[in-house]
Image: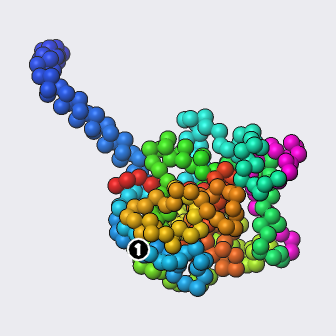
Amino acid sequence: MRRVVCLLIPILVLSVGCISSDESKKLNSEIKNSDERQAINNQKIDMVLIPGGVLNMGGDNEQADPNEFPKHKVAVNGFWMDETEVTNAQFSEFIKATKYLTIAERPIDWEAMEKDLPPNTPKPPDSLLQPGALVFRSTNQPVPLNNPALWWYWTIGANWQHPDGPDSGIQDKMNHPVVHIAWEDVTAYAEWAGKRLPTEAEWEWASRGGLEDQTYPWGGEDVNAGKPKANFWQGLFPFENNLKDGHQTTSPVKSFPPNGYGLYDMAGNVWEWCYDWFDFDYYKKSEAVQANNKGPTKAFNPRMPYQQEKIIRGGSFLCNDDYCSGYRNARRMGSSIDTGLSHTGFRCVLAD
Ligand SMILES: [Ca+2]
Ligand SMILES: [Ca+2]
């Protein structure tokens, strides 16, 4: 046996040595391609293939905001999409590999922040200008819904590892969506993962799950009817949450049934960052109907004129019909690109 092996070794060496340089290049290229194929296949673990098609984009019912009209058609190529929101476990892998520091963990640059605020906004005391994020707190009585400052609290020490403030942790939330991540943070994650953020049109196309002109990812049944279909707010926001769905804040991903494409939590749990700038009037513009468009070239929101906002989609554990109805397929909101919030996360896509 040993002798056979000894005899074979020189033959193998000779054989390899006899491959022409063209053949060698071909072999190397096949190995490389096979490595690349394997890498791409690994990326697609936990992703689902969304077929291409023509999306009828925009509001479906009387809850729609004026910025959801006019409804218009957009062709979208097929793509792969993460089947769930990116979890704390997944985000931890990114941080472990890159030592990346999220915006909520970095010292605050007042000069940069000032540009997103109305002119002559006074500088807050240095004791407040410390790394942190906005954390949701329930109110202790019913309040008017036009003043988010009543339920969002600037919380020093809140970040993705401490979602409710410095004394909180994520040890028991590793399968929950990561939160308190700004747009720059999620694009850094996407680049590391070899993926990208979905465009707004891709997100809505995926959310509809193969159904046409339906209000929700699951179809037309009212969000409040039957068994809970998503993690949202039941009761009087932001005062009373009767927890019919079992979750006060984020829930583990896959806690509710997927849509027709196999995507979980497209409605509710956390809002999801998209690639596009938020332009309130974008649907009225001719470029909105271009196939595979990547949205406007800059942000425009008459309600928040000084903020640079990107699109967020899908609503969160804070949405109900009285407040934002964010769980509707067509609901669009803007969020300041440099702000981390308790209710905003993301998922990635990959070209087919
Ligand atoms: Ca809930
Ligand atoms: Ca979601």
Q: Is residue 88 toward the left or the right of residue 26 in the image?
A: right
Q: Is residue 33 part of the magenta span, yes or no?
A: no
Colouring scheme applied when the structure was drawn: rainbow
Tag count:
1
Report the side of 312 relative to 26 (left or right). right
Q: Is residue 216 above or below residue 95?
A: below
Q: Where is residue 78, by image quadrant?
A: bottom left
Q: Position of residue 65 (x, y in %)?
A: 61, 77
Q: Amino acid at mark 1?
A: Lys
Of 218 and 89, the residue lying toward us: 218
Q: Residue at x 38, y 64 (%)?
A: 291
The residue located at (60%, 46%) in the rendering is: 185
Point out the stretch of residues depicted in magenta: 121-141
Residue 150: give x, y in percent of width and height. 82, 66
Is residue 10 shown above or below 101?
Answer: above
- Residue under label 1, please give it: 73
Provide residue 324's location: percent of width, then percent of height: 66, 74
Magenta stretch, overall SS: loop
Q: Where residue 120 appears, x then y in whole percent?
A: 82, 53
Q: Residues within 10 Å of mark 1 (few under 14, many from 20)?
A: some
Residue 13 visible from this viewpoint: yes
